[in-house]
Image (cartoon, rainbow, N blue to C red):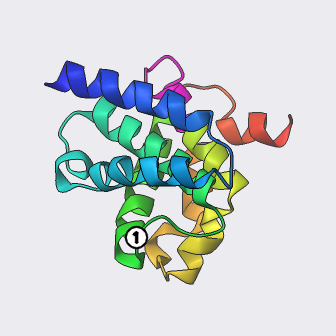
Amino acid sequence: MECNALYLLDKLELVLSTVGQEPTKLIQESLVLSMKALISEEFLRHTDEDVKILVISCISEITRITAPDLPYDDEQMKEIFKLTVASFEKLSHISGCGYEKALTILDNVSKVRLCLVMLDLECNDLTPSHCYGVCLEDREGKQGIGFHVGNE
């Protein structure tokens, strides 16, 4: 099942990445089932880290598509933010399989200014400085991702 889930989530992420903001009504309607599935306990609490990061990557794409509106209610968004910030830890492992996904998530967080939404929802334990602190960690003796993002 995990291989199938990974495959399907990877394909879903690819499709979502091609959808622009303000999609047609037909595309909006087709997103509903994916949005419901992604927020399920089965996916959000999955034990496989690769599945979790793909789920958050898909959700970050949906959030980008629906911006400035949030795709989920406040409590669901708080849970998503926790998992989003946790995904940034993958940025310290450049050779890991989650690194590229974490970069995509970070890019979407930046595009739609999700850190501001975190503050609006009073996610005090997930402040922007905490998010960036995770990104700036230098665990392998190299310059952190913050250096590269700030100098592009």
Q: Amino acid at mark 1?
A: Lys
Q: Which residues are magenta?
A: 91-102
Q: Position of residue 138 (x, y in %)?
A: 58, 36
**Residue 92 visible in the picture:** no
**Left or right relative to 82: residue 114:** right
Residue furthest front in the image:
26
Q: Looking at the figure, which quarter contains the C terminus? A: top right
Q: Nearer the viewer, residue 126 or 75?
A: 75
Q: Nearer the viewer, residue 142 or 93?
A: 93
Residue at 31% across, 40% down: 52
Residue at 47% across, 76% down: 123
Query: Quick check: is 53 in the magenta stretch?
Result: no
Q: Looking at the figure, which quarter contains the N terminus? A: top left
**Left or right relative to 126: residue 21:** right
Q: Which residue is mark 1?
A: 78
Q: Is residue 71 above or below residue 138?
A: below
Q: Is residue 52 above or below residue 66?
A: above
**Residue 48 visible in the picture:** yes
